[in-house]
């Protein structure tokens, strides 16, 4: 069941109306009950598939080169691209870590992990 947006010619407000079927009664403004509404184009978003996100990252040679050389700027960019468009809340600690990486600092926890694995 689609949602449609209209602009009321009487009060000039934008209203969103759920249209349940073709036999739906005429639409009216929720604010002033006027029936003179003009349909407006709604904004929408298109989410990229995971594969598309990966392909974009892998096609960025500068980013992949930075990731291979443990560049904190590249790691921050990669993290932002991977979380872009997700509906999940990003923890303040994660945001702080990204800010530090963008400033050129590799977080100690990440460096320690590389040392343990022998890199």
Image (cartoon, rainbow, N blue to C red):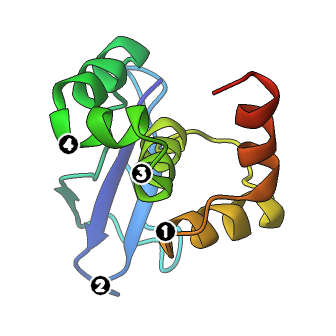
Where on the picture, by quarter, is residue 113? top right
Q: Dot 1: few (<14), some (14–19), or many (≥20) neighbours within 10 Å?
A: some
Secondary structure under tag 4 reads helix
What x and y, as percent, mark residue 20? 49, 25
Q: Which residue is mark 3?
A: 77
Q: Nearer the viewer, residue 92 or 114?
A: 114
Question: Which of the two labelled residues, at mark 1 and mark 4, occupies the earlier sequence position?
Answer: 4
Q: Nearer the viewer, residue 5 or 43?
A: 43
Q: Dot 2: few (<14), some (14–19), or many (≥20) neighbours within 10 Å?
A: some
Question: Which of the two labelled residues, at mark 2 and mark 4, occupies the earlier sequence position?
Answer: 2
On the rendered image, what quadrant is the C terminus found in?
Answer: top right
Question: Which of the two labelled residues, at mark 2 and mark 3, occupies the earlier sequence position?
Answer: 2
Q: Mark 1–mark 4 contact, CB under 8 Å? A: no
Q: Which residue is mark 4?
A: 62
Q: CA distance from mark 3 to mark 4?
A: 11 Å
What x and y, as percent, mark residue 39? 20, 55
Q: Which mark is residue 79?
A: none
Q: CA distance from mark 1 to mark 3?
A: 8 Å
Q: Which mark is residue 102?
A: 1
Q: Which residue is found at the position 49% from the left and 43% from the top?
A: 70
Taking the image as shown, residue 63 lies to the left or right of residue 91, namely left
Q: Mark 2–mark 4 contact, CB under 8 Å? A: no
Q: Dot 3: few (<14), some (14–19), or many (≥20) neighbours within 10 Å?
A: some
Q: Dot 4: few (<14), some (14–19), or many (≥20) neighbours within 10 Å?
A: few
Q: Which mark is residue 12?
A: 2
Where on the picture, by quarter, is residue 25? top left
Secondary structure under tag 3 reads helix
Q: Mark 3–mark 4 contact, CB under 8 Å? A: no
Mark 1 or mark 2, which is nearer to you?
A: 1
Q: Which residue is found at the position 53% from the left and 68% from the top?
A: 30
Q: CA distance from mark 1 to mark 4?
A: 15 Å
Q: Is residue 68 above or below residue 73?
A: above
């Amino acid at each position: 069941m689609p949602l449609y947006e209209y602009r009321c010619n009487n009060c000039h407000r934008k209203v969103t109306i759920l249209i349940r079927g073709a036999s739906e009664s005429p639409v009216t403004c929720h604010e002033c009950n006027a029936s003179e509404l003009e349909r407006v184009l709604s904004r929408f978003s298109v989410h990229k598939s995971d594969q598309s996100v990966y392909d974009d990252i892998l096609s960025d040679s500068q980013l992949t080169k930075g990731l291979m050389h443990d560049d904190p700027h590249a790691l921050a960019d990669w993290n932002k691209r991977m979380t872009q468009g997700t509906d999940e809340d990003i923890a303040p600690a994660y945001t702080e870590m990204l800010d530090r990486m963008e400033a050129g600092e590799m977080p100690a926890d990440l460096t320690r992990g590389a040392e343990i694995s022998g890199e």
